[in-house]
Structure formats: C-alpha cells, structure tokens
C-alpha cells in the first residue's frame, strides 16, 4: 500500500497546489482590475479638466465678443478695459489647454485658437475701435464682419475640443464601468469556482483510493468466481491503474489459455473417438468402394450415374475418417530444417497439377520471401497445402493468392496466405478452427482444425485476419529452433 499512498500524497499536494494557484489567480486578477479602475479614474479626471477648461474658454470668447459688440452699440471705448480683461482670460485658458493637449491634433487646434484670438484682438484695437471713435459706419460694419468670422472660427475650434473631451469622458466612463462590472463578475466567478474546486478536491481525495480499490476488489471477486470476461477499468493513473492493467492482462491470458485447453480437449476427444472406430469404419468403406467400382464396370446409363454418386460419397467418408485420424495423431516426430519457399512452391505445383487452382489454373498464386523452419516436413506441407487450397477456393475463378514468407531475427518464421476473396464474418472467424465447422457446401470442417493441431504440436499456431488483397489472411507462425537444433544444423 506504500506506493499507492505515495501517489495519493502527490495527488493531494497537486490538488492543494492547484487550489492555492486558483485563489492566487483570483487575487491577482482582482488587484489588476483595481489598478485599471484607478488609472481609468485618474484619466477621467484629466479629461474632465480639459472639458471644463474648453467650456470656460468658449464662455470667455463669448464675453470678449460681447464687449466688442457693446463697443459698437455704445459708440465709445467704455468697454475697452472689459475687452482687455476678457482677452487676458482667453489667453490664460488657451495656454492651459495647450499644456494639457494630448496629441498633435489638439495642439494644432489650440494653436489655431491662439492665432485667431490674436487676430481678433488686433482687429479690435487697430481697426474696430478707431472706426467706432471716428464714427465711420462702413469701416465699423466691415470690421464687425471680420470679427464675427474670427469669433466663429474660435467657437468652432472650441466646440470641437469640447466635443472631443466629452467623447473621451464618455469612453473612459464606459471603460471604467465595464472594468468594474467585469471585475465584480470575474471575482465572483473565480471565488465561486475556487470554492467548488475546493469541494471537488475534497471529494477527489476521498475517492482517489477507495473507489479504485473497490473496483479491484470487485473484479478479483468475479475472477475468483470464474468470470474470465471481467475487465477492470484502468483509468487510474497511479499504481492502482497499473495493478488493474496487470490483472486484465492476466485475465486475458487465462481466458486464452482456457480456450486453448477447451480446444485441445475437443480435439483429444475427437481423436480418441477416431482412433477407436477409424479402422472399423475404413474396413466396410473399403468393401463398399470395391463392390461399387466392380459394379461400375458392368453398369450403364442411370445405374452408372447412381454408382458414381455412391462412390463419391464413400470417398468423402474416407476423407472424413482420414481427417479424424489426423486429429488423433498431430504429435511431433523427428524434426528437420524445412526450406519454406521450396515447400510452398511444391504445394502450389501439386495443387496446380491436381487442378485445384481453378479451371485451367485460373487462380494466380505468388510466393514471396525466404525462411527456414524446424518441422516434420510431411505435416508442414499438409498445413501449407490446406491453407493455399482454401485460399484458392475463396478467391474463386480469376482470383489471386499471395504467400509471404518472413523470418524474424531470433529465427522464428511466418507464412502468411492471403486471398482476394470476399473475406469472412466475425462469427465465422471465431469458429474457424472448431472441428466440423465449415463455410463450404462440400467441406468436412476438419482441414483447419487439423492444421491448427499440427501447428500447435510444432509449438506454433495459425491466426486469421483481414488480408491485403481484400479477403482473409491465414498466418502460420512457427517458433525459433532450439540451441540443439541450431547446433545440429
């Protein structure tokens, strides 16, 4: 239990570290948002000050124009002093705006206001006031028109500055409001999330060992009851998950071993039955065949055809008996090195001569690769003959069969026989090596069972899967030779 506890300690430390990090993130976010709010408030005050100064400048400009207008209306210089005071106030406000200008556009606007104000003041002192004192109505009217132009220009610039300041204030107010709302929302979310995370950490710590161990216990109990299909979840990343994986692998090995034992028992039972009755069956079959062939020499017409059918069925019965005998005697005898390519090519040649590769040899068979296996040569050829013959029958007329031989670095060898046929269903694949199971109308269902028994007697096995040609692929795997065999070679 020590390693599990160590893993649990690491998990607890990681969980608490994540919790502290979450609270630190929430605090850091809140502090950062407060800093943003402070900066936004300071900027808002600055923009508000500029807006206020711009409005004061607009008022001062209107006062300056009012004194200019009073000078025209009264026809004397009684408002000259008031005009100078208004002008001084306009200049002071203009300087303050220039000092607080944010960018080149604002500085250019303030400079234009300053220049327009200077021009208006010069017009008042040098042109308008002398024309008023001289009672020159035409000159007064012309000077008043130009004064209105300068005042309008100044007012437009001031209004633009005021509008820009108001827009900036609105933007800053919106930004500050958004930051405040987001800060409150995120702080609430982070703190609530941290609370929920803390609760989850508690539940996780409580279940990090108990639940996986309970699953292990339940799986072990089912395994003890003989349920070899049990599979324990391996989702735990620690030692408990590794132990579950080991138990699953052990269960799989037991299941496979049990299946092999059952298969061996089946084959052994059939073998014992075959050994007991094969000779008794062969004797009457031989007599039947002898009389049938004798009668065929004299029979004609329909009777000859009926006797041919009897002969074919009797021969089929002999094949079944031979298959049963093969199941009864798959044992190993003296082994010798067998060149797999030569054995495969010999099998293909025999099948072609016996017209078992389709009409006029229409099934194409290719042999690739090299390899050597220690085996009983006749038995090995029997397995290869059965595999290639089955592949040719599955491929059909005009089909393809490919035999690939491969040797591993340790000396083990494989012979893979692929066909271009339609393949087979998963149900058929699961029962292929059962005695008397066949997918062919005229098959005995013993060929693959016998081949598997011979392969296992040699320490190997036959596996089936989907092949590269679109059909099935049967792979005969044979073990590497022993040291004594290598020395003998």
Image (cartoon, grey):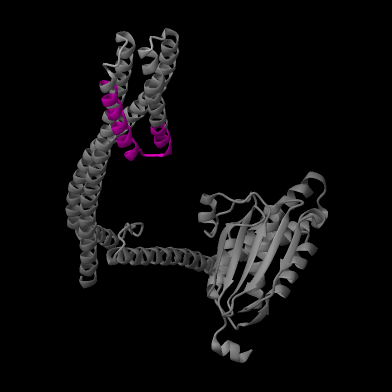
309 and 337: which is toward the camera = 337
60 and 70: which is toward the camera = 70
Residue 162's spot in the image, x, y percent? Answer: 33, 26
Left or right of 68, for residue 17: left
Residue 192's spot in the image, x, y percent? Answer: 19, 43
Residue placed farthest to the bottom in the image? 487
How many numbered discs, if any?
0
Q: Residue 7, located in which quarter of the rendered image? A: bottom left
236 falls in the magenta region? no
Instruction: Identify the image quadrant of the C terminus.
Output: bottom right
Q: Is residue 440 above or below residue 123?
A: below
Q: Is residue 440 above or below residue 281?
A: above
338 and 72: which is toward the camera = 72
Left or right of 305, for residue 71: left
Magenta region, mostly helix, strand or loop?
helix
Instruction: Identify the image quadrant of the N terminus.
Output: bottom left
Q: Residue 226, located in which quarter of the rendered image? A: bottom left
Residue 157 visible from this viewpoint: no
**Magenta-colored span:** 82-111
Q: Residue 285, located in which quarter of the rendered image? A: bottom right
Q: Residue at x 41, y 19 (%)?
A: 127
Residue 273 visible from this viewpoint: yes
Residue 270's spot in the image, x, y percent? Answer: 50, 64
Residue placed farthest to the front in the image? 134
Residue 64's spot in the image, x, y percent? Answer: 31, 21
94 falls in the magenta region? yes
Left or right of 172, for residue 115: right
343 and 454: which is toward the camera = 343
């Amino acid at each position: 239990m020590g390693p599990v506890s160590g893993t649990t300690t690491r998990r607890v430390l990681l969980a608490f570290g994540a919790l502290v990090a979450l609270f630190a993130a929430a605090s850091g976010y809140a502090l950062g948002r407060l800093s943003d709010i402070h900066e936004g408030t300071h900027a808002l005050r600055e923009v508000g000050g500029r807006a206020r100064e711009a409005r004061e400048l607009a008022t001062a400009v209107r006062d300056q124009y009012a004194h200019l207008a009073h000078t025209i209306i009264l026809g004397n210089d009684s408002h000259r002093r008031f005009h100078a005071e208004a002008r001084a106030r306009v200049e002071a406000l203009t300087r303050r705006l220039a000092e607080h200008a944010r960018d080149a556009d604002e500085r250019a606007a303030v400079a234009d206001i300053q220049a327009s104000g200077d021009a208006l003041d010069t017009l008042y002192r040098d042109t308008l006031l002398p024309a008023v004192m001289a009672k020159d109505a035409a000159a007064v009217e012309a000077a008043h028109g130009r004064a209105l132009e300068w005042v309008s220009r100044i007012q437009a610039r001031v209004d633009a500055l005021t509008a820009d300041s108001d827009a900036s204030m609105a933007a800053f107010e919106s930004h500050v409001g958004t930051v405040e709302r987001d800060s409150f929302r995120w702080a609430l979310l982070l703190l609530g999330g941290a609370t929920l995370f803390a609760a989850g950490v508690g539940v996780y710590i409580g279940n990090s060992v108990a639940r996986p161990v309970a699953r292990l216990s339940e799986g072990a109990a089912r395994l003890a009851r003989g349920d070899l299909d049990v599979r324990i979840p391996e989702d735990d990343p620690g030692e408990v998950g590794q132990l579950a994986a080991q138990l699953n692998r052990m269960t799989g090995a037991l299941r496979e071993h049990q299946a092999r034992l059952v298969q061996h028992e089946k084959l052994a039972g059939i073998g014992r039955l075959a050994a007991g009755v094969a000779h008794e069956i062969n004797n009457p079959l031989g007599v039947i065949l002898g009389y049938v062939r004798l009668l065929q020499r004299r029979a004609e017409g329909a009777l000859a055809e009926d006797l041919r059918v009897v002969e074919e069925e009797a021969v089929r019965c002999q094949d079944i008996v031979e298959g049963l005998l093969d199941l009864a005697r798959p044992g190993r005898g003296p082994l010798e090195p067998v060149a797999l390519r030569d054995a495969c090519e010999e099998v293909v040649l025999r099948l072609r001569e016996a017209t078992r590769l389709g009409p006029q040899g229409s099934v194409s068979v290719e042999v690739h690769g090299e390899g050597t296996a220690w085996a009983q040569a006749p038995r090995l050829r029997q397995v290869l003959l059965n595999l290639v013959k089955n592949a040719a029958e599955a491929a059909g007329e005009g089909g393809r069969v490919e035999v690939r031989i491969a040797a591993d670095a340790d000396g083990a060898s494989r012979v893979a026989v692929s066909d271009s046929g339609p393949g087979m269903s998963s149900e058929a694949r699961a029962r292929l090596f059962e005695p008397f199971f066949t997918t062919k109308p005229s098959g005995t269902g013993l060929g693959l069972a016998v081949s598997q028994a011979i392969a296992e007697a040699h320490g190997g096995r036959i596996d089936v899967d989907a092949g590269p040609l679109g059909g099935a692929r049967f792979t005969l795997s044979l073990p590497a030779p022993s040291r004594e065999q290598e020395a003998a070679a």
